[in-house]
Amino acid sequence: MTAVAAAGAARRGRPRSPEARGKILSATAELLAEGGFHAVTMEAVAARAGVAKTTIYRWWPNRAAVALACVSARMAPIAEDGPAGSHRERFRRQLKATNRLLNSLEGQAITALIGAKQTDPMLAEAYSEQIARPRRAQTRLLLMQAIRAGEVAAGTDPDEFLDAIYGPIYYRKIVSGETVTDAFIDRIVDAAFAGFSAAP
């Protein structure tokens, strides 16, 4: 084996660094927040993270995959909620956690990617598959528990209920720009539980 071939084999076999991965995701979040999805190029991410492009390619095949990993990592904690309290209270906590994230620097990266997928069908499908559908499935499970507990009427359409709760937050955040307060979230959740109540 030549020296060049040996060097190439060593590069291919080099283990991926969790520290480098963290730097890449942080750099991607900054670029998304500053310039949207168009600002996220492999060159820009590499320069901001202080790594070589080859390091990024060890983890992800393209810039869309990097951006999705960045957003997914920042959204994951929202769905982690303990069982304490009624399901109405659990939805309140989850929505308030979502709102806090969307108002943070990381939230700017999330909303930038949500905006970008409106004009990029491939990105939109990847976002749906990797982020939206899994998270929807988690909140659907919480709703099913609320139905079994008698807090929500049996036969409730899950998508209608979840849209009624989450839709107003994302509308204000992405479309109207109006402030989302804890009191606003309380009213949304109360209205949804009243509208889909199991009580006669």
Image: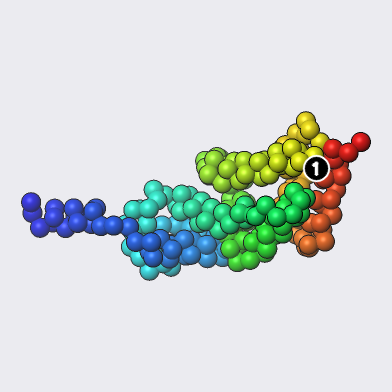
51 or 94: nearer the viewer:
94
x and y percentages locating residue 188 in the rendered image: 81, 51
**Residue identified by numbered label 1:** 151
Crowding near the residue tagged with mark 1, few <14, some 14–19, many ≥20 C-alpha atoms within 10 Å: many
Q: Is residue 155 above or below residue 151?
A: above
**Residue placed farthest to the top in the image?**
155
Quarter of the image with the C terminus in it: top right
For residue 190, side relative to residue 140 (left or right): right
**Residue placed farthest to the left in the image?**
1
The three-letter code of the residue at mark 1 reads Glu
Residue 161 visible in the picture: no
Say what secondary structure mark 1 lies in: loop
x and y percentages locating residue 63 in the rendered image: 45, 52
What count of labels does the image hold? 1
x and y percentages locating residue 151 in the rendered image: 80, 42
Q: Residue at x 55, y 58 (%)?
A: 74
192 or 67: nearer the viewer:
192
Q: Is residue 101 above or below residue 189?
A: below
Q: Residue at x 58, y 63 (%)?
A: 106
Q: Residue at x 80, y 39 (%)?
A: 150
Q: Residue at x 88, y 38 (%)?
A: 199
181 or 56: nearer the viewer:
181
x and y percentages locating residue 35 in the rendered image: 56, 62
For residue 48, side relative to residue 189 (left or right): left
Q: How is the image coloured?
A: rainbow
The quarter holding residue 41 reads bottom left
156 or 69: nearer the viewer:
156
**Residue placed farthest to the right in the image?**
200
Residue 60 visible in the picture: yes
